[in-house]
Image (cartoon, rainbow, N blue to C red):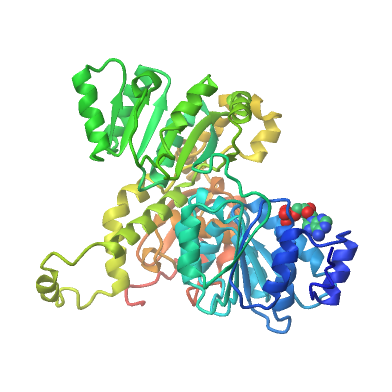
Amino acid sequence: MTTFEALGLDARLVRATDELGYVNPTTIQEQAIPVLMSGTKDFIGLAQTGTGKTAAFGLPLLQVVSATANYPQALVVCPTRELCLQIVKEIESFKKYLPGIAVVAVYGGASIGLQIRDIKRGVQIVVATPGRLIDLIERKAIPLDKIQYVVLDEADEMLNMGFQEDIEFILKNTPARESTWLFSATMPPEIRKVSKKYMKEPMEVTVGKVNTANASIDHQYYVSTAQHRYETLKRIIDFNPGIYGIIFTRTKADAQEICDRLTREGYDIDALHGDLSQQQRDKVMGQFRDKSLQLLIATDVAARGIDVVGITHVINYELPDDVEIYTHRSGRTGRAGNQGICVSIVHAKEMYKFKQIERINNSRFHKLDIPSGKDVCRKQFFHFMDKLLSADISHGDYETYVPMLSEKFAEVTKEEVLQRVAALEFDRFLKYYENAEDLNLRERERSKTGSLPALGGKMRSERAEGGRGDSRKEFSRSSSGGYKRLFVNLGTRDGFFKASFLQFILDMSDLKKEVLGKIDMKDMNSWIEIDKSSAQQMIRSLDGKKYKGRSIRMNDADSGAPPKARTKSYQ
Ligand code: AMP
């Protein structure tokens, strides 16, 4: 049995591992550490949690980064906030005797302002979840030009959670990347594809048996309430732009009602249930099979025996009572060597049933956060841009027409064209989601109501109604003195939509959405209604800060002299 010393680790790192009680390296550590310490090798480690993989990449990473260079050199990307914090904690304990190396955790749901400040202070290693990392990249708050090492931890989980584009975006935007180290419990084809595209002759090490149970179906669930089930369903559909799926309901009435609502709202869906004649059934099935229908909503009886290749998602609008039914439903996807996803919308009160299915079905289920409005818009945006970039222009007579437009477009920049195309395509989503509420049950609410199952609908519904409804109520309250109106010299010309602007000011100020009232955005300036008690915090957090290199000015819009608004001449 070898030792950490024999693997060639720095004595200070060996001392730290000794103190942690690590006597011998685990198998993955033994295989990975000597290779990764050479610093330039691409590496794939097929290892599950619990095999010591964090140390397998964390220790060599600490050895290869330079303590004297005060900028991010290594990026560790992982799927969840919990894992992100855990990795940072382990790296912190490994670097106990290495002075001058700093590591920072970057994840959603925490103040982005503080994270930006931490990065600016000078760090060598950034551990991040994909969504927040993309936010920071978009805000140019993290320099990527000198990132040499990118570690993708639990890569399969990240792909399962829909982060494929984000991962590729990160890999594409790290031009100085010399080494990519990918860790994953399974090796689905998507990961193979990513590795082929972005890695050079990676060394591959497998520890133990690679997870094969239900490898072709990923089981996911979202915890919602009866009241928000329909809205959650819509978020799931909107968050998966290329979805080709079947939604299961328990009753014919539900199938028809949801189908009617979704159709009215512009979705490409039809229903399949026992009230249809054979002819109607055949027609619906025919349309679904040839993909002129994107979604099918069905009861179990009606969907019996459906065998359609290429279904990406099965969605359980409600959990079935019977494990066998669950297995039958989920088996509509992940066929013929394809990967599939089975999503369940689970009520807090149904958790016991869900656990039972999980145990009997012997699969690992992944709990996901219900995507926020911002997540949905971003997902749709990237999906559309990918479609735009891969559009086939080889057939049309575009070469003849496009030059004719050059005069029309002479004054418009490429960015503006993209923004306009996006506006045409996304207005529906942005309008719908700009004030979308958070549908997830938060810890805060859980503790207020005691245990999770006790939550039920009431608490949640009170809060939910406090979303849009309350803000209108509060708005009228503003005239009686509850709000202050702030002026800020940022507007739509700065690339903001209302939703992204809201997110920006909340992230910067670390305030909650509830403190805000009406937001009035113009090209160059905006006016924000904010609870009086939070106004100073908002001003302190934004006034004088920079956005895209320009100073932000924020002040009380109604005190003394009228605010000097930015005029159109500003560029
Ligand atoms: P991981 O697979 O990175 O989640 O690690 C699982 C657990 O194993 C963590 O609690 C580590 O602290 C621990 N661990 C990692 N490497 C070793 C080692 N060489 N000897 C003993 N424990 C270890």
Quadrant in which the N terminus is drawn: bottom right
On screen, residue 332 above or below 201: above
Q: Is residue 541 visible?
A: yes
Q: Quadrant of ligand 1?
A: bottom right
- Name the residue at 19% across, 74% down: 409
Q: Give the residue furthest to the bottom.
A: 68
- Name the residue at 60% across, 30% down: 358
Q: Is residue 19 left or right of residue 407?
A: right
Front-most of 45 and 276?
45
Q: Is residue 487 visible?
A: no
Q: Where residue 410 sits: x, y (%)?
A: 20, 78
Q: Where residue 365 sits: x, y (%)?
A: 58, 38
Q: Give the residue furthest to the front.
A: 1
Q: Where residue 565 sits: x, y (%)?
A: 40, 69
- Name the residue at 70% across, 75% down: 37
Front-most of 85 and 33?
33
Q: Where residue 501 sits: x, y (%)?
A: 46, 58
